[in-house]
Amino acid sequence: MTEQLVIALDAMGGDHAPDMVVGGAALACARFPGLNFLLYGDSAQLGRLVARHAVLAGRVEIRHTDEIVRSDDKPSTALRGARKSSMRLAINAVHDGEAGAAVSAGNTGALMAMAKFVLKTLPGIDRPAIITAVPTMRGMCCLLDLGANVQCSAENLVQFAVMGEVFARTVLGVQKPTVGLINIGIEEIKGNEAVREAAAVLRESSLPLEFKGFIEGDDVAAGTVDVAVTDGFTGNVALKMAEGTAKLITSFLREAYRSNWRARLGYLLSRPALAKLRERADPRRYNGAIFVGLNGIVVKSHGSTDALGFSNAIGVAVNMATNGFIPKIRQDFERLRSEMQAPDQTPVA
């Protein structure tokens, strides 16, 4: 249910803001009856845009600010000097209990820095991670970390696995998610020390996840597991390469269909199938990366998305807020902490 749920929006963040943000809010309102918004940004611009969408009448409160975080601002600079920015005020609304989640298409580094400073991390979590769901041959796979943590310890990777498992249960509805650690091979001797230590902990854990061991990069697209865990460096490279490959294949298809009259005729015959392919591979459908591990919900939309993509990012925030993502994270980390602190019961020979 979305009754009484309020989402705070950084209305000035993103390449096509604020038009895209307001348009996305209108699409989300049509999808989620009872959803309301706090819009932070230039009140004159926002007032005109909101007036164009009848569905937003009575469901939006505009809060004016002249400050914005620019795409090239350094996180440290934004954190110190943009305390009244649309991004910071949206995060503050979550901290103050005025909103159940915040959504922004603005500067990723600044958003992470502000969210971590304002909301803090949950007990038992050292570092927040960035997670998103990507399409696979079998459905969807949750991939994390996507760039928040370049270097990770074994403990960080275990924490990411727990957060990813909760995300898969909460957002994707997987009853008992399968989890894999991305490695350079599936053999137990492969990988660095952190990966091998994390695998050992997950194998012994009694958490409600099914650990599948090591997986390789192609296992993500194959849908071998529901949650794929890696460090932020590897995850970011993998995601960007997948996005680039999708664009490359699209370019090759366009070039092939334009090569001669027979190919153009083939395009006309295959248009229905290509339309289905385009819809399934549309990145706007999967828009919305989440900062997991924080004491509050913050969703990062792609900066270049349109209203449809932004509405899907709002949808992710709604699902997390209404399905108790934060309480479930707390519960699983309490169990993990108890396991780690429990004395060794192995009998002495």
Image: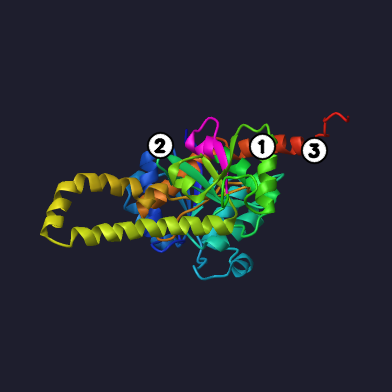
Q: Residue at x 17, y 62 (%)?
A: 259
> Between residues 317 and 273, which one lies in front from this camera angle?
273
Bounds of the magenta segment: 168-182
Q: Earlier in the sequence, mark 3 or mark 2?
A: 2
Tell me the quarter of the picture where residue 249 sits: bottom left
Q: Are marks 2 and 1 in contact (CB under 8 Å)?
A: no
Q: Amino acid at mark 1?
A: Arg
Mark 2 vs mark 1: give the one in front.
1
Residue 330 in magenta?
no
| The label number, if any, that marks residue 33 in the structure image | 2
Q: Is residue 237 above or below residue 208?
A: below
Against 225, residue 185 (above or below) is below
Please indicate whether residue 30 sits to the left or right of residue 35 in the image.
Answer: left
Mark 1 and mark 3 lie on one chain; the one further toward the N terminus is 1
Within 10 Å of disc 2 (Cα), the crowding (few <14, some 14-19, many 20+) is: some
Query: Mark 3 = which residue?
Result: 341
Looking at the image, which residue is at 61% across and 43% down?
161
Give the quadrant of the C terminus. top right
Amino acid on which the number 2 mark rests in the picture: Pro
Task: Name the amino acid, label 3.
Answer: Gln
Residue 182 in view (yes/no): yes
